[in-house]
Structures are given as C-alpha cells and as structure tokens.
Image (tube, rainbow, N blue to C red):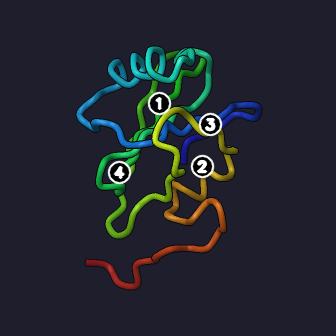
Amino acid sequence: MIPIPSGVRVWIATGYTDMRRGMHGLALQVQEALKRDPHAGNLFVFRSRRGNLVKVLWHDALGMSLYAKRLERGKFIWPSPTEGVVVITPAQLAYMLEGIDWRHPQRTWRPEVAG
C-alpha cells in the first residue's frame, strides 16, 4: 500500500489513459489536460481502457513515484464523467486498490485458491 500522508488529495483522471505513458508523460498530462500541478504532493490516478490496470502518480518531497496495479479479475470502479478529474479520499483510494467498490464498500471478488 502507498503510505499516504494526511492532508493529501487524491485526483482521479476520468476516462481512460494510454498506459504506455511513464511518469513524465503522466505528469505532463496532469499539467496540461487536468490543469493541476503534478509536483504539489497530491496523488493522481489513471485507468486503462480495459479497466483492470491503474497507475498512481505521486510526488513527495523527495521525487516522483509511479505505482501500478493490475486486477487479475474484474475492473476498477471508475467515475462516469468523461472529462476532467474527480476528488476522492485516501480511504476511498485504498478501497479502489483492493478491488472494492469505493462508492459502496463491498469486496467485488476475492481469490479462493492460488493458481
């Protein structure tokens, strides 16, 4: 889990993002398309077209980090607006990264056996 400090805002980029982008490309998208400062210490979350992969961009006081998570089964629950950003809480982000519907916290799927 990402150690999220208190007071950090979590921004979800609505729609889908080209997951071939790295941290520099995503930071440029934050700056130009979302009109936010990628170095402000906030978290920016991007989803793939298929919905099973997210990337989280975060700049702490030391540098920029890029986290990725892919669900083996199911999709990440995403807001419906097609343009812009949506703000969620760090707790809602934690639910999302666990594969739980962050709007109504219930586990969407849990593996029962390995392999």
The residue under the point 61% across, 16% down is 40
Q: CA distance from mark 4 to mark 2?
A: 14 Å
Q: Mark 1 belongs to which amino acid?
A: Leu
Residue 30 lies, in percent from the top left, at: 47, 22
**Residue at image mark 1:** 57
Q: Is residue 72 above or below residue 36?
A: below
Identify the mark nearer the N-term, 3 or 4. Answer: 3
Q: Mark 4 belongs to which amino acid?
A: Leu
Residue 13's label in the rendered image is none
Q: Around disc 1, counting alpha carbons within 10 Å, would you say few (fewer than 14), some (14 to 19), or many (20 or more)?
A: many
Q: Mark 3 belongs to which amino acid?
A: Val
Q: Secondary structure at mark 2?
A: helix
17 on left or right of 98: left
Q: Mark 2 belongs to which amino acid?
A: Leu
Q: Nearer the viewer, residue 32 or 23?
A: 32
**Residue at image mark 2:** 93
Q: Secondary structure at mark 4?
A: strand
The residue under the point 66% across, 67% down is 104
**Residue at image mark 4:** 53
Q: Nearer the viewer, residue 112 or 27?
A: 27
